[in-house]
Amino acid sequence: MAKKNRPKPVPPPELRPLFDAHTHLYSTVKKMGEQVASYEEGIRALMAEADASGLVGVCTVGDGLPETEHALEAAHMHPNVWAACAIHPTLAHTLDDAAKQRLTEMSQDPRCVAIGETGLDTYWIGKDTETPSLEVQEEAFRWHIDLAVSSGKALMIHNREADEDLLRVLEDAPRPQTVILHCFSSPLEVAKEALGRGYVLSFAGNSTFKRNEELREAARIAPAGQILVETDAPYMTPEPFRGRRNAPSYVGYTAWVLAEVRGQSEREFAELVTANACRVYGIPSL
Ligand SMILES: [Zn+2]
């Protein structure tokens, strides 16, 4: 269907309580353009819409340091927003001493509930001359793992086409209390290995795409305590709005699909993923 003929996304009906475990509020607000006068107004609008869909919390994430500052800022603006702080693997070369010092400070902030997104991304290596090598990414990843361990915060991982290296580094590095594989998109055998190690799998909108049967199988076999849902907004919009701008309020569409796959009622699944988010992020129950 041509883009302009596609239906405009509408938030799903309320399914309470839901928690969007990984989203990018700053990028989402930027995509709203002139609809909002300021970042704060954008956060308020997105969170009002999220509340109407039953969301009781979101964890927002940056990519580089400036956006991570905005993530933490949002967590201080709104009581239902928490932040994850780190430098994205595709920007690993920007993790200099000043950035390390600032991230260490941020990790002590009570509104910072995870160190992420960090990890490995081999997809852009060679395609984009700016993307750091795997060695540079691995060094930054190990630094972030150490920060998760020393701060006691969850480690939130970005993995793009790096399954083997990722599992290798996680195996020989010190073990954080919680390891979250955000926007889990790897083969079923990786899901099994990760679940066996006790990691938490966070599923995004791509788990609703028709061809991704394997992701739904991973969601089906995940033990109760090891599953989260997220939007990764403004990207990864779930069906039936695939390809359009995403927002935290759409997380319910993913939750509906995964609840059915797991043979749980929508309400039961929503309560489960919200309780899991509170536990892994150290948030008192919502
Ligand atoms: Zn993300």
Image: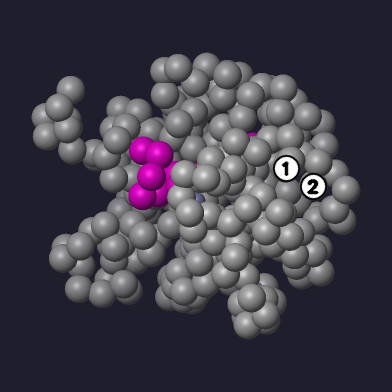
User: Which secondary structure is most common in the magenta stretch?
Assistant: loop
Q: Residue at x 40, y 39 (%)?
A: 236
Give the crowd class for mark 1: few <14, some 14-19, many >=20 residues within 10 Å: some
Callout 2 amino acid: Val
Q: Is any part of residue 57 visible from this angle?
A: no
Residue 241 falls in image quadrant: top left
What percent of the width, then of the height, locates residue 245? 29, 45
Cβ–Cβ under 8 Å for marks 1 and 2: yes
Q: Is residue 59 magenta?
A: no
Quadrant for the C terminus, please.
Answer: bottom right
Residue closest to the eye, 22 or 57:
22
Q: Is residue 114 left or right of residue 229?
A: right
Residue 33 falls in image quadrant: bottom left
Q: How far apart are the two marked residues, 1 and 2, measured between alpha carbons?
A: 5 Å
What percent of the width, then of the height, locates residue 55? 44, 50
Residue at which label 2 appears: 169
Residue at which label 1 appears: 166
Q: Is residue 48 left or right of residue 260?
A: left
Q: Residue at x 16, y 63 (%)?
A: 35
Q: Is residue 279 left or right of residue 48?
A: right
Magenta stretch: give its range: 227-237
What percent of the width, then of the height, locates residue 166? 72, 42
Residue closest to the eye, 192 or 19:
192
What percent of the width, then of the height, locates residue 115? 66, 62
Q: Is any part of residue 99 visible from this angle?
A: yes
Residue closest to the eye, 21 or 52:
21
Callout 1 amino acid: Leu
Q: Secondary structure at mark 1?
A: helix
Q: Is residue 125 above or below residue 107?
A: above
Q: Is residue 228 magenta?
A: yes
